[in-house]
């Protein structure tokens, strides 16, 4: 049976914040969370200067946030370098314990992975990235952990999630991409194709030798709330097989997860 993970990591907020209650906004909390997020994708041990560069905050503000987080047990430090403590997982667990999506998806992903002998994942859209919230993995594909983030435009799941946005929200996401690497008009055309056909296929765009196909998971209103994907080594699956058997199995699994979410209300 493939190894299965469900998310135990925090999610990021968008870079642009809409403050609905200006009088209730706590800037110090915002800064503290930004400091925690600054450790994402790093070696794990950062100086105050490193965090200041990553967040755009002053060193004084970073110092206060780090020492507060250390006092609370979320951060540790050795020789002037700070690192996250396991306690930060509690922040993500609060979300997971109240979220239906990973719970409903888990067994469906296991069964799909066993049928296809491929790695299967679920993700949600978080800003311009996708966040992996569940995964059933085989040894043939790249090792991706639950809680990992990747650019939405580069993945089949990301393109499915982007296709589920309205045009204004989509434009906002595409305007933020690295235009030297990703040409926005080509991305719009690719996402338009996803909207028409109901699935996305990506061939070795993010990881050399990896192919994937993804389909949307919808809530009771029809809104796209997550995406599921099957990925495999390019030497093990042809594009025709990906568009055929993989796609059919994946679309049905996405529907079954959607039905499960509806049943849970």
Image (cartoon, helix red, strand yellow):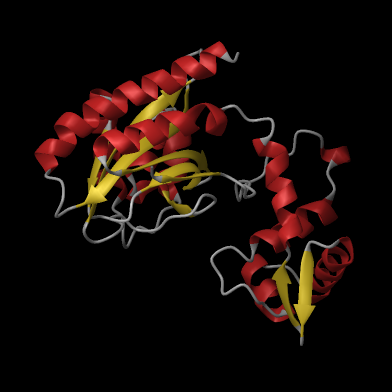
Q: In the image, what residue occupies the spot 59% across and 15% down?
A: 264
In the image, residue 194 above or below residue 81 = above
Residue shown at 49% from the left, 17% from the top: 260
Q: Residue furthest front?
A: 1
User: Could you say where residue 229 lies in the image, as x and y percent from the top left?
Assistant: 34, 38
- Residue 246 vs residue 151: left or right? left
- 49 up-or-down from 10: above or below: below
Image coordinates for residue 193, horizontal then vertical, percent: 23, 31
Looking at the picture, tell me which residue is in the foreground, 116 or 32: 116
- Report the side of 43 relative to 246 (left or right): right
Residue 82 sits above or below residue 9 on the image: below
What residue sits 38% from the left and 25% below the top?
254
Quarter the C terminus occupies: top right
In the image, 162: left or right of 37? left
Residue 241 picture location, percent across and down: 13, 37
Seen from the viewer's position, the closer of residues 88 and 17 is 88
In which quadrant of the rendered view does residue 74 lie?
bottom right
Residue 112, compared with residue 235, is above or below; it is: above
Work out whether residue 251 can be spotted: yes
Q: Which quarter of the figure is the N terminus placed in?
A: top left
Q: Position of residue 189 (x, y in %)?
A: 24, 38
In this figure, what is the number of numbered marks?
0
Residue at 64% from the left image edge and 74% from the top image edge: 53
Residue 36 is drawn in which quadrant? bottom right
Q: Is residue 261 left or right of residue 188?
A: right
Residue 165 in sight here: no
């Amino acid at each position: 049976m493939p190894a299965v993970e469900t998310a135990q990591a925090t999610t990021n907020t968008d870079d642009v914040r809409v403050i609905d209650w200006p009088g209730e906004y706590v800037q110090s909390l915002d800064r503290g969370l930004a400091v925690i997020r600054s450790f994402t994708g790093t070696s794990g041990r950062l100086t105050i200067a490193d965090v200041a560069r990553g967040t755009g905050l002053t060193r004084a503000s970073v110092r206060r946030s780090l020492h507060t987080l250390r006092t609370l047990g979320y951060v540790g430090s050795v020789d002037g370098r700070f690192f996250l403590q396991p306690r930060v997982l509690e922040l993500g667990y609060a979300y997971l314990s109240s979220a239906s999506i990973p719970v409903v998806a888990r067994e469906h992903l296991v069964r799909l992975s066993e049928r296809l002998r491929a790695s299967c994942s679920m993700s949600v859209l978080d800003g311009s990235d996708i966040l992996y919230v569940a995964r059933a993995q085989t040894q043939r594909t790249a090792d991706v952990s639950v809680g990992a983030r990747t650019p939405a435009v580069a993945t089949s799941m990301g393109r499915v999630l982007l296709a589920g946005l309205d045009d204004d929200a989509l434009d906002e996401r595409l305007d933020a991409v690295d235009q030297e690497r990703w040409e926005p008009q080509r991305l719009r055309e690719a996402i338009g194709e996803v909207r028409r056909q109901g699935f996305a296929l990506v061939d070795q765009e993010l990881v050399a030798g990896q192919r994937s196909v993804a389909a949307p998971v919808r809530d009771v209103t029809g809104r796209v709330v997550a995406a599921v994907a099957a990925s495999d080594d390019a030497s093990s699956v042809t594009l025709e097989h990906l568009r055929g058997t993989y796609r059919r199995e994946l679309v049905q699994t996405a529907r079954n997860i959607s039905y499960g979410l509806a049943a849970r209300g």
